[in-house]
């Protein structure tokens, strides 16, 4: 199946299906120069989506992204950030968003997500999201770490069906969302943003990239096992992947993975080695 470069949001916005995550960037694991060069390598190659959060390094990841995008055409970028659950109410959401915008050196986000469910009622968060959207500070809003029952609850509150995406952990070794969440989201026009697509976390991650079936498929495509993990996620319609890397080489390898077309036999082999569960399992989270 040929890679479709965008997913369509409920308002018709086209969202890039392959972008860059930023958790742990800006925290000194590598030099700032190296990490900025990694993000810019992705942007220069054609990546447009960057996923970040106020939580990551206490704003450090957002600041790094702000430096990396300096000089790029903002209108071509698709910037996603997330609000802490404890900031997702009337008293703090707008202030949190304004701080994120300042660090990112931009005046709007393409997507603002509730990072996970907390104690603020969903109806209040929706009201705040709609208010900052009406003021042009965000183009769309969504949620993260929501399971099917959470999505149903969200869609039952006034304006809750304005949710544009749900970001959850999803990779070859963690396929619980395929049971009833992905079908529900498809029925309701809500794309999935797959985090940890390279199996950095999740129920089954150890050895995933070393498994014989993944290595065999990789060899057939002259690709790396990590690229096959990414290709597995990207061959699902309306699923967006946000692998994270602090090195330009890995970012470019991840971008190249969109060109890998898995055959039906290869998909069947991956399915049989790492089947999706045939029953409901708790939502996997990092
Ligand atoms: N909403 C949430 O609750 C939530 C939770 C977790 C993550 N996220 C988002 O999703 C993004 C991705 O998830 P993640 O960062 O946890 O994990 P991930 O993307 O699955 O894996 C990242 C790891 O893979 C390595 N890597 C990346 N590309 C590679 C390649 N081509 N070959 C070999 N190794 C490679 C990276 O190391 P190098 O730097 O050395 O390349 C890093 O150690 C995050 O950065 C964040 O933006 C969201």
Image: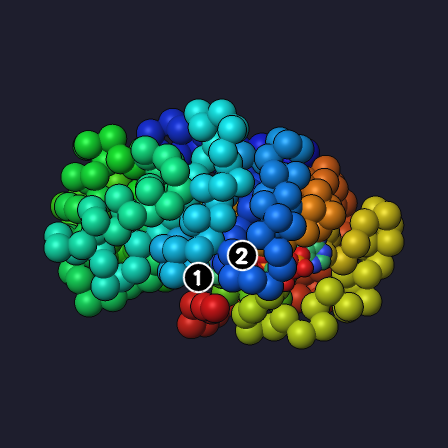
Task: State the image coordinates of residue 275 (x, y, percent, origin top left).
Answer: 63, 65
Instruction: Name the residue tied to disc 2.
Output: 25
For residue 86, above or below residue 52: below
- Element class at badge 2: loop
Q: Quadrant of the N terminus?
A: top right
Q: Are marks 2 and 1 in contact (CB under 8 Å)?
A: yes
Residue 276 location, quadrant: bottom right
Task: State the image coordinates of residue 246 (x, y, percent, origin top left).
Answer: 63, 54
Q: Residue at x 45, y 68 (%)?
A: 285
Pick the residue in front: 189 or 139. 139
Query: Is residue 220 left or right of 118 when viewed as pictured?
Result: right
Pick the residue in front: 3 or 21. 21
Task: State the image coordinates of residue 146 (x, y, percent, origin top left).
Answer: 35, 60
Residue 217 location, quadrant: bottom right
Q: Is mark 2 within 8 Å of ligand 1?
A: yes
Ligand 1, seen in the image, is in the quarter at bottom right
Answer yes or no: is residue 280 visible.
Answer: no
Instruction: Name the residue tied to disc 1.
Output: 57
Task: State the image coordinates of residue 220 (x, y, percent, origin top left).
Answer: 86, 50
Query: Is residue 61 left or right of 221 when viewed as pictured?
Result: left
Q: Residue at x 81, y 49 (%)?
A: 223
Residue 84 location, quadrant: bottom left
Among numbered discs 2 and 1, the one appearing first in the sequence = 2
Q: Residue at x 38, y 27 (%)?
A: 12
């Amino acid at each position: 199946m040929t890679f479709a470069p965008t997913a369509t949001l409920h308002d018709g916005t086209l969202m890039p299906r392959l972008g860059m995550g930023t958790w742990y960037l800006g925290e000194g694991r590598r030099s700032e120069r190296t990490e900025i060069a990694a993000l810019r390598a992705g942007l220069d190659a054609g990546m447009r989506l960057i996923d970040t959060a106020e939580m990551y390094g206490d704003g450090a990841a957002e600041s790094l992204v702000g430096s990396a995008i300096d000089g790029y055409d903002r209108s071509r970028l698709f910037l996603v950030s997330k609000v802490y659950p404890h900031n997702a109410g009337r008293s703090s959401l707008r202030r949190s968003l304004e701080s994120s915008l300042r660090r990112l050196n931009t005046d709007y986000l393409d997507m603002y997500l509730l990072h996970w469910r907390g104690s603020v009622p969903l109806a209040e968060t929706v009201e705040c999201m709609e208010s900052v959207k009406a003021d042009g500070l965000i183009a769309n809003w969504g949620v993260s770490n929501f399971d099917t029952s959470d999505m149903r609850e969200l869609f039952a509150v006034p304006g809750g069906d304005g949710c544009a995406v749900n970001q959850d952990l999803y990779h070859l070794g963690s396929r619980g969302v395929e049971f009833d969440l992905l079908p529900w989201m498809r029925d309701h026009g809500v794309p999935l943003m797959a985090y940890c697509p390279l199996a950095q976390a999740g129920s089954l991650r150890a050895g995933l990239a070393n498994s014989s079936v993944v290595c065999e498929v990789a060899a057939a495509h002259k690709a790396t096992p990590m690229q096959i993990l990414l290709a597995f996620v990207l061959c699902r319609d309306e699923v967006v992947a946000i692998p994270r890397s602090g090195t330009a080489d890995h970012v470019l390898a991840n971008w190249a993975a969109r060109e890998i077309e898995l055959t039906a036999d290869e998909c069947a082999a991956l399915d049989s080695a790492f089947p999706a569960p045939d029953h409901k399992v708790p939502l996997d989270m990092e």
